[in-house]
Image (cartoon, grey):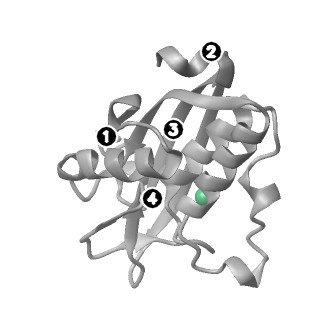
Amino acid sequence: MRIGYGYDIHRLVVGRPLVLGGVDIPCEVGLDGHSDADCLTHALSDAVFGALALPDIGHWFPNTDPDIRGIDSRRILEKAIHEAMVRGWMVGNVDCVIIAERPKISPYLDTMKESLSATMGIRPDQVGIKATTNEKVGDIGKGHAIAAHATCLLLRLDHAKDV
Ligand code: MG
């Protein structure tokens, strides 16, 4: 087994869509970034890359590359899963935390689990996602940004049949 951990944060700005876990969330503000700025999917991708002891997503998808402007971040997660598979690893489970003061995230958690599990080729019951606020503390608490943490457990493919 191998474990990985990832973290990401993006600023909330007017005039951008809000995408978390590949799910469009209606909101008057959205996350700013070179890609779709989906900080949950970025944190999860980095957890997978980290479990493989590979470089982070900035190595694979540089934010200076005009070809990936506005990219659906699920393509980044697919790349991470591909790198795991070719090395003989599959995802056992993942667990994530979204930290957002606004909007209310909990109505979208099940849809995010379906989206991310489909992207990773695993079942929704292998994907944990929780959402919390920052109790109005700091920039996240003031609604200036959304952050996400993620962990990932990888299993050797030849031991994965019981998952
Ligand atoms: Mg990011």
| 155 lies left or right of 92 | right
Identify the element where label 1 is drawn: strand
Amino acid at pointer 4: Ala
Crowding at mark 2 (Cα within 10 Å: few <14, some 14-19, many 20+): few
For mark 1, what is the residue? Answer: 131
Label 1 with label 4: CB-CB less than 8 Å = no
Residue type, numbered disc 1: Ala
Q: Which mark is residue 145?
A: 4
Q: Which residue is mark 3?
A: 149
For the residue marked with disc 3, what is the amino acid? His
In the image, taking residue 67 as reference, residue 142 lies left or right, namely left
Asked if residue 44 is positioned above or below residue 115 in the image, the reply reads above
Of label 1 and label 4, which has the lower sequence position?
Answer: 1
Front of the two marks 3 and 4: 3
Q: Is residue 28 left or right of residue 88?
A: left
Where is 116 relative to 47, above or below?
below
Q: Quadrant of the N terminus?
A: top right
Looking at the image, which is closer to me, 51 or 14?
A: 51
